[in-house]
Amino acid sequence: AQKITQTQPGMFVQEKEAVTLDCTYDTSDQSYGLFWYKQPSSGEMIFLIYQGSYDEQNATEGRYSLNFQKARKSANLVISASQLGDSAMYFCAIQAYGQNFVFGPGTRLSVLP
Amino acid sequence: DAGITQSPRHKVTETGTPVTLRCHQTENHRYMYWYRQDPGHGLRLIHYSYGVKDTDKGEVSDGYSVSRSKTEDFLLTLESATSSQTSVYFCAISESPTGTNTGELFFGEGSRLTVL
């Protein structure tokens, strides 16, 4: 079985600063993917970034990067140069090969002006 | 944006009444899912489908049933709604991961259900 832990229920960051959202996972599978989703107050779920278990490079998508430490089973999301529009819930998820997605409880990020 | 629509978007109903939520996709994706979102729990899988008439249970399937008679439609039914089923329901679709596709989920806008 897969499990995702997000230990930060809420985070604050000053506009233009970088912020790291923590995600640790548990799986016995060797092949899996890690995903981050953003949910703004409007409610939609937006896919941000993906990291495969065999990817040697950390994934990056614009201001988003994933700090993947396989031995520690962590997949932290780093947002650089925070913007007010980054205020949202952020969910980490894992999908082991051939299995369903498992989501963490989420972290609410608030960007302060 | 993935073509996924959910209906209704908002519904208030009474305990004991049946409720059906519809998910319609225009992407021809094989996999379809129903999740519920509750504070502190993230998203939890109710049921999923891997093809027409092929469905299976997720982690919180009690009190729910699903049907998929066409590739594009996935229905979630609460046979007799209870207050514990008050939640936001999300439909999602995906395809199998390939070399260029991560297999990510694409979500609908969500359906807010209140059971009084």
Image (spheres, coloured by chain):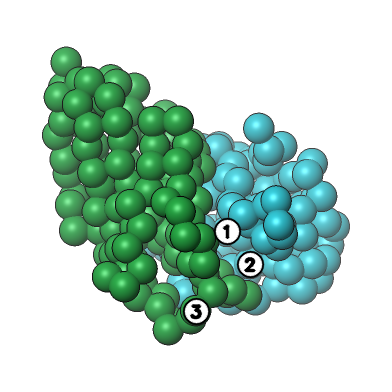
Chain colours: A green, B cyan
Secondary structure at numbered mark 1: strand
**Residue closest to the eye, A69 or A100:** A69
How far across and down, in percent of the image, does residue A10 sit? 17, 44
Residue at the spot 42% in from the left edge and 51% down from the top edge: A58
Callout 2 amino acid: Tyr
Mark 1: which amino acid?
Trp
In the drawing, what numbered circle is on residue B14? Answer: none
Q: Quadrant of residue B26?
A: top right
Reply above or below: A16 against B59: above
* Apparent side of residue A72 relative to residue A34 in the rendered image (left or right): left
- From where the camera sits, is residue B63 visible? no
Quickly name the residue at label 2. B48
Q: Quadrant of the C terminus of chain A?
A: top left
A100 left or right, relative to B28: left
Q: Which mark is residue B34?
A: 1
Q: Label 3: which residue?
A: A30
Task: Tell me the element at label 3.
Answer: loop
| Mark 2 and mark 1 residues within 8 Å of each other at the beta carbon | yes
